[in-house]
Image: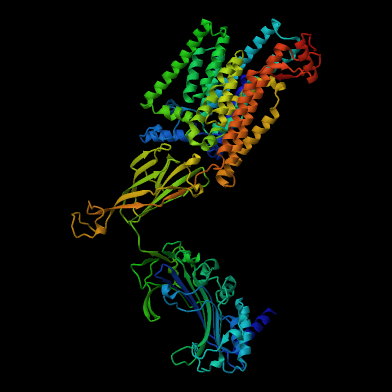
Amino acid sequence: MLILSSLLLFILTTHSEALTPAAARDEFQEELVIRPLHSGDIYASFQFRTLWDTDFLQEGQKVSHYRLFPKSLGQVLSKFSVRELHISFTQGFWRTMQWGQPFIPSPPGAELWVWFHDTVSDVDGNWKELTNVLSGIFCASLNFIDLTNTVQPSASFKPLGLGNATDHRFLRYATLPREIVCTENLTPWKKLLPCGSKAGLAVLMKSEKLFHSSFHSQAVHIRPICQDEQCSSKAWELRQTLNVVFDLHTSGQGKKEWSLFKMFSRTLTEACPLASSSKVYVDITDNPELFELSPATPLLGQAVVLGDRRTYSVYDLSRAETFGQLRSFNLLLRDMLRPLLHAERYVAGFGLQTGEIHTVIYNNHPYRAFPVLLMDSVPWYLQLYIHTLTVTSKSRDNKPSYIHYQPAKDRHRPHLLEMLIQLPPHSMTEVTVQFERALLKWTEYTPDPNHGFYVGSSVVSALVPSMVAMRTNFTQDQPLFSSFVPVKEESSYFVRVYTEPLLVNLPTPDFSMPYNVICLTCTVVAVGYGSFYNLLTRTFQVDEPSPPLSKRLANLIRRMRGVPLLT
Amino acid sequence: MAAPLTLLLIVAVTIRAVLFRSSWAELISERVEVVSPLNAWKRVVEGLALLDLGVSPYSGDVFHEVSLSLIHFLFKSILGSDGITAVALYLSIQTYNKNVFRKQKYALESDRYPADCLELLRSPKEMFYIPLKVAMFYLLNPFTILSCVAKSTCGLNNAIIALFILCTLKGSALLSGILLALATYQSIYPLTLFAPALLFFLQRLYIPVNLRRSSFWFFTLQYAFIYVGSLVVITGLSFFLLGSWDFIPSVYGFIFSVPDLTPNIGLFWYFFAEMFEHFRLFFICVFQINVFFYTIPLSIKLKEHPVFLIFMQIAIISIFKSYPTVGDVALYMAFLPAWSHLYRFLRNIFLVSCVLLACSALFPVLWHLWIYAGSANSNFYYAITLLFNFGQILLVSDYFYAYLRREHHLTHGLYLKKKDGTEATLVLK
């Protein structure tokens, strides 16, 4: 019985293979191009291409076996006899003057242009139904596309793929500039990909980061292309592109340091298994002075794009060594401008009672350590506690070799703290000290007391080792900018770095209350005084009720008469 | 009675040790109700750190303790100071009770009490547990526990005052003078305790308090000499310790001129934060005189009762001093069981206890709302300060009233009648 059923199954499968024609070959490629822009922003362009040797428009043959090509789009193509479909959803406007030319241009809002096959009789009807179906596929309100905003351009939008018919009656073009792109549009777009958003480059496409950008554009381009030079066989090409520009200040926090994690809050762990090639390109034409790339890659590529020959570093994700030890690939682009000495300062803590001043000093020299003098002048109303002073470098204690501390005297002089700290090479040193905030007299507050009080900058003075030997003798023809600080040694130069000033809030009394406070406090003191006065100056006596008024008057008259009084 | 006292000490030390090891210790030592700029442990550590750096601790405005304490702190066992205070209070109240009972016996024998006030007399049975209750009131008072866990030097001050009371009650004038000088040296206000100590010694030595008698002046001058002499010696020693007189403006000048307006449970801080500059000196003088000038009238009124006078003085110091903390409040509250026989004459005790409990609970709440949450402002905390001090004043004056009334009844009889024979009410006239 079992042998019979398995034999039957075997026959059926081989028979089915023989029945259907040879399965169409399809191929999937994915790539990501990262281009740092001159304004500090960064441009990332994803392209996912599925190539399929099949013909949707062949009469009498229904394509039923979809593998990498999404079924919804395939059915749309065959139902509406579409020859080329280009749809894009864009948020933001591409600023050509600042960013150059994009790889795939698109207008803000939604744009849809379609070339129909010349066998179509009612193009407008097909167009109407097509827009409605696409509206459902992409969760966008493309149903607003109707005859009032559709045009048939005669010359601007020639077919990008194969096509010898140039009758513009079969072309339809419409834009919806008001269309907003959001996660609801990204999700169905991602679902069209063979690996979805589970593997490969598409894991980077998380909406919370993608929509927090200056420019975001996702598009689908479908067209028939030639497979080879002679065009002996045709194939359908589906390209899904996503262009995004991350702003230096919004996403980059003002620092020209970009990484995959910073841009997309994800790293790459594997290539899409269904992809025949999965690559990341980084445009390094303007390098090496602009930024450094890590991890380093030996692969280089060159391409002519938009009339310019550009050089790219290539990372091949199909090779396991790209992902390194940690099995995660995070590309880092770091700005090359690295000053040797840099300092920052901030206030930590919460509430209006205590706080901590943190001063962070960076030594960016790769191998030399040098000492710095840190001077802090803190106003008297922030009471510093010098026993809480800690200096740590590379998470180890670093005791300063010289400390000069002059504590503050209330309303006379501020705190002065000077320290000589040895900075280890290529490290960050953190100096922390705790303080307490004082309550001042109400006349000592500024007119806007809740703005806070300013603490002046710390001063970091150092002799920084120089890469270039300098002349110590004075010459007349030196330009002014190089002769400000006298050069005493050949191998190091004097540098003074100022940190940020701090703004700290102090607890405030209620400024409308002086009279009330004086009254109330004096009342309480008077209550004490009054009770004690009573108890000290009076004695206990039996309470005799006083006689009524008539009796008192009668007694008065009797006294005058000299007669004995009433009791 | 040694066993219950030892048990009490063990329990108290355990509570303090448990709190000390927990994360609450850090929180408590930051609370403004428990520590003030005068007695915070953080400032002592800062003073020692400054000394390590080669800077005089008094050159800044952070350290306001006296120099001898600098050495003492290195060896001081903070948990021990509370124990010393409790044992000293225990022994002094024991001695005091014996004195009281002896005097009562003599008065009874010489028929000085009216017939109907026998129920006001105190019996040894009732007085047996009072010393233990006093020690318990001090050790298990939450204020004391908080003050000890915060390592405030107030505990040390309390210990010196308690030892001073013990030596006074035991009759040793020399030790009492030296200890009082030490207490005055640390914070000036115990100066007012000179008068009750003097009155006690005069009473003990049967010297009548008469300004025309030479014996009075003889003893007064002796005691004053001991006191002032030890004060001068201690001050001189601290001069030699750090080699300068810097500590005098830094400690005593600080206490008197109140430059630091950190909020605390007293009346000074907000008053002087909102003071017009023109009147500042005037009001400083008024507030400081307020602490000292109750001494003479109280001494005149209570010259037969020096121990109650000590209680009153300590209470007045704790309420009206420039930087009070809850540790100061705990010291005079420890005496309250000694006056438990006055309960029937207290008029406001329920109100006072409710006020004090409510205020103690509201202090941290309103502080948090002002400083951390930002939803209240300084007026809220100030209001609770006012209420707390008002409650304390009411408590002290209530006990004073009850004490005076009991004395009146002991001389005039308990059930008083008016001229027409109906029951009378007593008023202060």
Q: Nearer the viewer, residue B404 or B193?
A: B404
Residue B177 vertical placement versus B331 (above, below):
above
Q: Position of residue A274 (x, y in %)?
A: 52, 76
State which quarter of the image contains the C terminus of chain A.
top right
Q: Position of residue A459 (x, y in %)?
A: 35, 49
> Colour scheme in the image?
rainbow
State which quarter of the image contains the N terminus of chain A.
bottom right
Single out the residue that lies furthest toward the right.
Answer: B421
Residue B126 vertical placement versus A410 (above, below):
above
Q: Nearer the viewer, residue A560 or A177?
A: A560
Residue B416 vertical placement versus B186 (above, below):
above
Which image quadrant for residue B119?
top right
Does residue B65 appear anywhere in the picture? no
Q: Position of residue B9 (x, y in %)?
A: 59, 26
Does residue A204 appear anywhere in the picture? yes
Q: How many marks?
A: 0
Residue at (31%, 50%) from the top-left corner?
A: A462
Residue at (18%, 54%) from the top-left corner?
A: A473
Q: Nearer the viewer, residue A87 or B378?
A: B378
Q: Nearer the viewer, residue B85 or A14?
A: B85
Q: In this image, A76 relative to A347: left or right?
A: right
Single out the residue that lies furthest toward the front.
Answer: A561
Q: Position of residue A383 (x, y in %)?
A: 45, 40
